[in-house]
Image (cartoon, coloured by chain):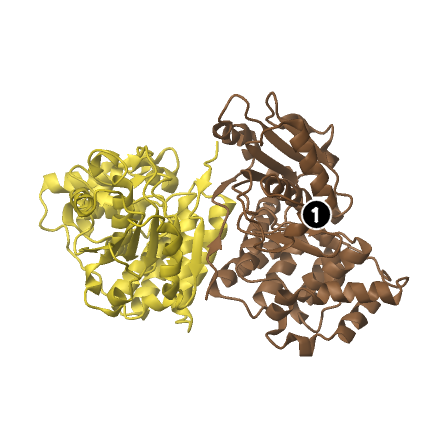
Chain colours: A yellow, B brown
Amino acid sequence: MYRNFKIVPNIIFGRGSFNQLGDILKPKRVTSDSYMVFVLDDVFKGKTLESRLPMENGDLLLLVNVDDEPKTAYIDKLVAEVKAFNGRLPDGVIGLGGGATMDIAKAISLMLTNPGGTADYQGWDLIKNPAVWHAAVPTLAGTGAEISRTTVLTGPEKKLGINSDYTLYDQILLDPELLAGVPKNQWFFTGMDCYIHDVESLHGTYLNEFSRAYGEKSIELCRQVFLDDHPDKDDKLMMASYFGGMSIAYSQVGACHALSYGLAFVLGTHHGIGCCITFDYLDEVYPEGVKEFREMMAKHDIKLPRNLTAGLDDKAMDTMANVALGLAPLWENCFGKDWQQIMTKERVLEMYRKM
Amino acid sequence: MYRNFKIVPNIIFGRGSFNQLGDILKPKRVTSDSYMVFVLDDVFKGKTLESRLPMENGDLLLLVNVDDEPKTAYIDKLVAEVKAFNGRLPDGVIGLGGGATMDIAKAISLMLTNPGGTADYQGWDLIKNPAVWHAAVPTLAGTGAEISRTTVLTGPEKKLGINSDYTLYDQILLDPELLAGVPKNQWFFTGMDCYIHDVESLHGTYLNEFSRAYGEKSIELCRQVFLDDHPDKDDKLMMASYFGGMSIAYSQVGACHALSYGLAFVLGTHHGIGCCITFDYLDEVYPEGVKEFREMMAKHDIKLPRNLTAGLDDKAMDTMANVALGLAPLWENCFGKDWQQIMTKERVLEMYRKM
């Protein structure tokens, strides 16, 4: 049995394509009381991007804060804000920012049409009703959030995505010009999320030729960006992110992502840097990938934080290990059906203690 | 202004995935009088593939002949057959075969919901109404018909596709097992259609990083298939075809395709072999591509027909050149805005005379 893989059906790619966002939204504004919700990372408050939003009368601008990884309670609050703003549903939700902002916009569009709390839907295929039409405009490249069927959220009990075909964006706009001005560390950590997607997909037991083709091209583009300093690196990183996302969407991530989820749940570590931290301890699992990753770190003079878990008690360490080991499909992709013999709780704890 | 690029939203890929076709169609059979139209290349009449079709009571099997390239009049006839079979529209049209069969199925699904004759819609974005839901199952790889927004047809006046977002398939099923048993020449000529897509896209003036990423990976996969004889070559060729199609869909083909259309219109030359014939005279335009193509021909001991135009009169030669030169976007992609200075009618005629 193979998965019938749903993908984002509309893509516009190009330098300056952001200027066409208004035209793309126009046919979605179907009635006189139609309105759009723009979900914008609050780092852009007062910046050029905010002033360029093609907002019309009656539209709502939601400035969202992603200093912390997105929480299910935060989504509940944002959805309530939209509902209080206008009694009818919006005709579109547009997420503009990095992976966290794009995931928040996905979650809002889902929770506007599905009853109950956001945490109820963390898992696989629990969403029952189609989302409000939603579009993404990435301003950071690497997460693959623009094309994934998940929105990764931290709930009261777990960090786990809302995985569903309805989560997938209806439209993405990839304008490499929007990557200009990203701080170096954020650019690097987010880009490494993509590089790690590729390594985990290409080394995984779920790999097929579909995922391989996307993963191999994505990793080659990452090398052009992070090792060769290619003049078209912004365009290439945007494509690498898209291809890396397509690669894991039809296979799965692996050990690094699983471990990073534990770190994020207990310490609130952001996804990109969290993946870099855990990847740096995975020489045994991904020897070539980790070696090349360190070359990329050296080239860009990136320093990773150390001794993150030194102050944690046994209970916190236990929670961390349980969150990581709870992600069975990731471990199975990495090590095969017998993964539990290979990645024991003791081994996970030992790795976390080193971090 | 960039094109907002629509892509096939549902893909299932894998060896043996054909067994899941029935499950994919099930949710489309919405009422008790729902029915499906299976459009099958008549080369499979009485063969295993025919017996494996997940047909239910009331479904229609249309065996189509593709000895000749698809004609608009043939589509009109097939659409009339479907309408005579059942007064209501089918709930799905499934095309199973190579590029010609997939294009016929696309055209039927469009013409069931759009009034008038098929020839009226040859061109760009002339289709007004959405097509009947349609799915493709390629049994040959290379044309990219499974993911293109065109259905290439020969009409009374021209060979030109029905180019429209509605033309695009709603679902594709890529089962590399279905490539087994294809005759060598057909396998090669169809595969070269993909290789030539890649060369034309990568050498084109319309190229962007989106098309480049797909085109570069596709050409690499073609090399693994046609030069390295890779053990997974069927899987790789299916992905190469998909990626090559994605590459040209956001850019354009070029000189070779334009010339092959003239050959097809006047002589009825099939698309794959027609592209190979014309590509072999394009050293000056695509020197590296033509060199590598000849290596592939030599490796597989492929002989191309010669002296095709020797018996043609001036009028036929003139028509041939006019059909080729009528495809302005292809020439513009190849040579830029000033293509008419570079590719004069005399130069086209001279090339055709050599073939």
Q: Name the residue: 36% across, 37% down.
A: A332
Position in image of residue A138 (x %, y %): 33, 59
Q: How many marks?
A: 1
Position in image of residue B258 (x %, y %): 69, 63
Q: Quick one: SS at disc 1? A: helix
Q: Is residue B231 above or below residue A173?
A: above
Can you see residue A47?
yes
Q: What chain letter is assigned to the residue under label 1?
A: B
Q: Name the residue: 80% across, 70% down.
A: B349
Position in image of residue A204 (x %, y %): 41, 44
Q: Is residue A52 above or below residue B177?
A: below
Q: Which residue is mark 1?
A: B187
Which quadrant would residue A181 be assigned to in this image?
bottom left
Q: Residues within 10 Å of mark 1 (few under 14, many from 20)?
A: some
Q: Residue furthest right?
A: B311
Camera-nearest residue between B108 and B350: B108
Identity, as a three-letter code, of the amino acid under mark 1: Trp
Q: Name the residue: 68% across, 72% down.
A: B285
On the picture, is A155 further left or further right than B85? left
Which quadrant would residue B129 be assigned to in this image?
top right
Can you see residue A302?
no
Q: Residue furthest bottom?
A: B341
Q: Is residue A321 above or below residue B51?
A: below
On the picture, is A28 further left or further right than A113? right
Q: Residue furthest front?
A: A32
Camera-nearest residue between A224 and B165: B165
Position in image of residue B171 (x %, y %): 52, 40
